[in-house]
Amino acid sequence: FTLMDIEENSQSQFEFFYILPFTPTSALIEFTAYSQENIDKEILERKLKKYLSNYLKSSDYQISFQETGVIPMTNKRRDSKPSNRIIPIGTAAGWTKASTG
């Protein structure tokens, strides 16, 4: 089964946890937060650890890999090209939809 938990947040940002089990003892757990400002990595880690402790009802777990990133979510169009030989695509071209990421 796959689990997606949407967290209520008083800071007007949207957050969710996504759990994709691989085996009875391992899973991919993604924590995503949408915010107007960058969120400090330590704050994100604290929220993840709190969620894991509450969800698992234990602190007996191991995080074996972490990945972080910031995806600009905007509807502003970029019209600049770095050169005549380079054509930006994807996020660099402004093709990231703010509604879906």
Image (spheres, rainbow, N blue to C red):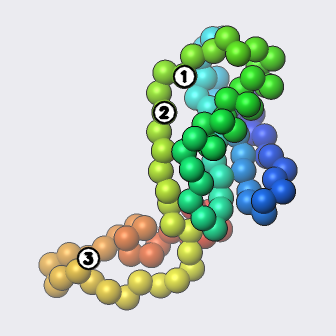
Residue 69: horizontal and vertical position, in percent?
A: 47, 50
Dot label at residue 66: 2
Residues 82 and 87: in front is 82
Give the amino acid type for the residue marked by disc 3 in the picture: Ile
Up/down of 61 relative to 14, above or below = above
- Which residue occupies 65% across, 62% down? 35
Q: Are marks 3 and 2 in contact (CB under 8 Å)?
A: no
**Relative to residue 22, is residue 93 drawn left or right?**
left
Up/down of 9 relative to 60, above or below = below
Q: What quarter of the picture does the C terminus occupy?
A: bottom right
Q: What quarter of the picture does the N terminus occupy?
A: top right
Residue 61: horizontal and vertical position, in percent?
A: 63, 15
For label 3, the crowd category at 10 Å Cα-Cα, with few meaning under 14, some 14 to 19 and many 20 or more, is few
Q: What residue is shown with label 3?
A: 87
Q: Secondary structure at mark 3?
A: loop
**Which corner quadrant of the image does residue 99 belong to?**
bottom right
Counting residues from the start of the chain, the first of labels 3 and 2 encountered is: 2
- Which residue occupies 72% across, 46% down? 16
Residues 9 and 87: in front is 9
Q: Secondary structure at mark 1?
A: loop
Q: Examine the rendering and report whether any part of residue 16 can be seen.
A: yes
State the CA–CA distance, disc 1 to disc 2. Answer: 7 Å
Badge nearest the viewer, 3 or 2: 2
Give the amino acid type for the residue marked by disc 1 in the picture: Ile
Dot label at residue 63: 1
State the CA–CA distance, disc 3 to disc 2. Answer: 32 Å
- Which residue occupies 47% across, 27% down? 65
Dot label at residue 36: none
For label 1, the crowd category at 10 Å Cα-Cα, with few meaning under 14, some 14 to 19 and many 20 or more, is few
